Image (tube, rainbow, N blue to C red):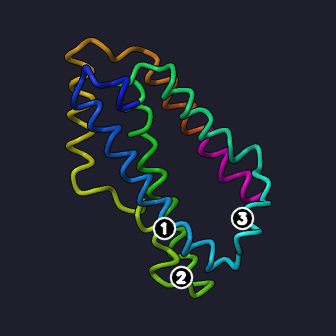
Amino acid sequence: MAQRAAPQPAVAAFFAALAENETVALDRLAALTAACGLDESAIETYEPRAGCQAYPSYVARLALLAEPADTVIALAVNFAAWGGYCATVSRALRRHYGFDDRACGFFDLFAEPAPDARERTLAAVQAGLDAGRVTGAARRYGRLVQAYELMFWNTLAG
């Protein structure tokens, strides 16, 4: 998405920062899976639940096909909810399972917005508006991102 948004540097910067954050998150998963008692074999043989795959699949679809500025809006709307969920999970893992900071690092990363996230998001949205690239689809994308997020959590609970 950062490459597709290259003509709008502020929009591209938004997606580049997301990619960097995802790399950090991936690095933190090993401590979480270890704390959950999952070894390499369990991770390799795990069969994903379909309801948990709808959200990342939809975001991938947006990355391939949607107007980047619309996608910024859709994702930004969801970040507050996602951050709240991550904060709740992090607290629960510590309180109920005794997980340490390292084990909760994945959730802690998303529990609070990055220090410059608000400014970066506003700059990306403004750039999209200035370029006439924000469409009516942003609302639909945001609604669906929220619905797929809920499906993810409901699938985990089921």
Left or right of residue 9, residue 104 in this image: right
In percent of the image, x 63 and y 72: which residue is there? 33
Answer above or below: position of 104 versus 145. below
Q: Secondary structure at mark 2?
A: helix
Relative depth, front residue between 82 and 15: 15
SS at mark 1 in the image:
helix
> Which one is in front in this view, the residue at disc 2 or the one at disc 1?
1
Q: Amino acid at mark 3?
A: Ile
Question: Residue at the spot x=69%, y=47% of the render?
Answer: 52
The disc, 2 or 1, on the residue closer to the chain's N-terminal end is 1
Residue 17 is situated, as x and y percent measured from the top left of the image, at 32, 45
- Compared with 132, 38 (above or below) is below
Left or right of 49? Residue 36 is left
- Residue 158: quadrant of the picture: bottom right
Q: Earlier in the sequence, mark 2 or mark 3?
A: 3
Label placed on residue 94: 2
Q: Is residue 153 magenta?
A: yes
User: What is the spatial separation of the Cα atoms under label 3 and label 1, in whole angstroms?
Assistant: 15 Å
Magenta segment: does it hold 21? Answer: no
Q: Amino acid at mark 2?
A: Arg
Give, as a single range, the part of the protein colored magenta.
148-158
Q: Earlier in the sequence, mark 3 or mark 1?
A: 1
Image coordinates for residue 65, horizontal then vertical, percent: 51, 19
Q: Position of residue 26 (x, y in %)?
A: 50, 59
Mark toward the viewer: 2 or 3: 3
Identity of the residue drawn at 50% across and 74% down:
104
Q: Tell me: 59 left or right of 116.
A: right
Query: In whole angstroms, how far apart are the C-alphas of marks 2 and 3?
Result: 22 Å
Q: Which mark is residue 28?
A: 1
3D distance between C-alphas at marks 2 and 1: 16 Å
Question: In percent of the image, x 37 and y 45: which residue is there?
Answer: 18
